[in-house]
Amino acid sequence: MPRVPNLDPQVARDLGLRLRRAREDAGLTQEQAAHTAGISRNHLQVIEQGLSDRASRAPFNPHLSVLLNLCEALEVDLARVVIDVWGPVPGIVVEYQPEDVHGARSAGPRDRAVGRVTSEGSAASR
């Protein structure tokens, strides 16, 4: 299996900082956020520091499932976190509206995001 390259260290730190701010804005301790996201407090600590582990000092390179669970626990939109860290892509518009599993509009933290990405007049919906 090919090795996945590490994130740029600055991007990893920015992502960790953005997630820490979201946790603090939600009024959660690391223990509470980690428990809700299904990870250990130590794992959350190194994520917030932008590291994959303290010993190697390698940049954090998160699994998508970890990011999704953390964002859900912190009640923040993953797309918003990505845009905050990496910046918007010129010419691309991303719109999200929460939708529950029955199709009714809702605003709960466990709602799935239904997004539309538009580029130069074309649209795709999921």
Image (cartoon, rainbow, N blue to C red):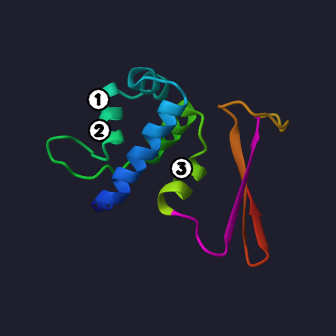
Q: In what element is the residue under mark 3?
A: helix
Q: Residue at x 71, y 30 (%)?
A: 108
Q: CA distance from mark 1 to mark 2?
A: 6 Å
Q: Secondary structure at mark 1?
A: helix
Q: Amino acid at mark 1?
A: Asn
Quadrant in the picture for residue 124: bottom right
Distance from disc 1 to disc 3, alpha carbons, whole Å, reads 21 Å
Q: Which residue is mark 3?
A: 81
Amino acid type of the residue tagged 2 in the rendering: Val
Residue 6 visible in this rendered orientation of the protein: no
Dot 1 and dot 3 residues touching (CB under 8 Å): no
Q: Which residues are magenta?
A: 87-100
**Where's residue 22, x and y in %?**
51, 37
Q: Residue furthest bottom?
A: 120
The local crowd at label 1, few if under 14, some if 14 to 19, many if 20 or more residues have their Cα within 10 Å, is some
How many marks overall?
3
Label 2, secondary structure: give it. Answer: helix
- Whether residue 51 sits left or right of residue 94 in the image: it is left
The 10 Å Cα crowd at callout 2, few under 14, some 14 to 19, many 20 or more, is: some
Q: Residue furthest right?
A: 104
Asked if the stretch drawn in magenta spans residue 96, the answer is yes
Return the residue at label 1.
Answer: 42
Pointers 1 and 2 in contact (C-beta within 8 Å): yes
Does 60 sit above or below residue 66? below
- Tell me: 111 left or right of 68: right
The residue that label 2 is drawn on is 46
Q: Residue at x 34, y 51 (%)?
A: 13
Using the image, tell me which numbered label, if any, was put on residue 102.
none
**What's the residue at 34%, 26% (across, down)?**
40
Q: What is the distance, in whole Å, between disc 2 and disc 3 at their CAs?
A: 18 Å
Estimate how packed mark 3 is, as few (under 14), some (14 to 19) or many (20 or more) residues with alpha carbons within 10 Å.
some
Asked if residue 93 is positioned above or below residue 78 in the image, the reply reads below
